[in-house]
Structures are given as structure tokens and as C-alpha cells.
């Protein structure tokens, strides 16, 4: 079932607790196709290598004044 594939189970002992943002459903693919499909590969790459976030590092803009 889809729930089983997503690691969901009614019994807490068997539930994998995968966060929703780490789950994906690829409709129209069978068990063999899912191993080699470009959409699946792209999703896995996005999970493993997320785009860098552009956060502002204030420590790089602070000037130290010497006495």
C-alpha cells in the first residue's frame, strides 16, 4: 500500500516516523521503474543535496577596532 511505502503503520512500533517533507509519491511507476526514473532521481538528489540557503552571516560584516 502507499501508506506502507511511506513508512506509515497503525502500530507505533512499526511506524518509521519519516517527516512529510521527506516523502514523495510518484504515480504511474511500478517497483522496477521507480529505481531508474529521472523524477525519482531528481527528488533524491534534492533531498540529499538541497540548494544552499542564502542567509546573511552578520559575523562577516563586523569590523574589529584595534586600540
Image: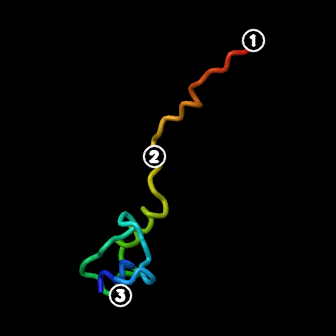
Q: What residue is drawn where x is 42% and y is 72%?
A: 17
* Residue at (48, 59) in percent of width and height: 49
The earlier-in-sequence mark between 1 and 2 is 2
Give the crowd class for mark 1: few <14, some 14-19, many >=20 residues within 10 Å: few
Question: Disc 1 designates what residue?
Answer: 67
Residue 19 position, x and y percent, is 40, 66
Q: Nearer the viewer, mark 1 or mark 2?
A: 1
**Distance of mark 1 from mark 3, alpha carbons?**
68 Å
State which quarter of the image contains the C terminus. Answer: top right
**Residue 2 drawn above or below residue 50:** below
- Which mark is drawn over residue 53? 2
59, 11: nearer the viewer: 11
The residue singled out by tag 3 in the image is 31
Residue 59 vertical position relative to residue 28 in the rendered view, above or below = above
Find residue 42 and report its image quarter: bottom left
> What is the tally of numbered marks visible in this picture?
3
Q: Nearer the viewer, mark 1 or mark 3?
A: 1
Please tell me whether mark 2 sits on a helix, a strand or a loop.
loop
Position in image of residue 51 (x %, y %): 44, 52
SS class, disc 3: loop
Q: CA distance from mark 1 to mark 2?
A: 36 Å
Among the two numbered marks 3 and 2 on one chain, the one whose residue lies closer to the N terminus: 3
Amino acid at each position: 500500500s502507499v501508506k506502507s511505502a511511506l513508512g506509515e503503520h497503525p502500530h507505533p512500533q512499526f511506524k518509521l516516523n519519516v517527516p512529510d517533507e521527506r516523502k514523495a509519491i510518484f504515480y504511474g511507476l511500478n517497483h522496477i521503474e521507480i529505481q531508474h526514473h529521472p523524477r525519482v532521481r531528481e527528488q533524491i538528489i534534492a533531498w540529499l543535496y538541497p540548494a544552499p540557503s542564502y542567509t546573511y552571516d552578520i559575523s562577516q560584516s563586523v569590523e574589529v577596532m584595534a586600540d
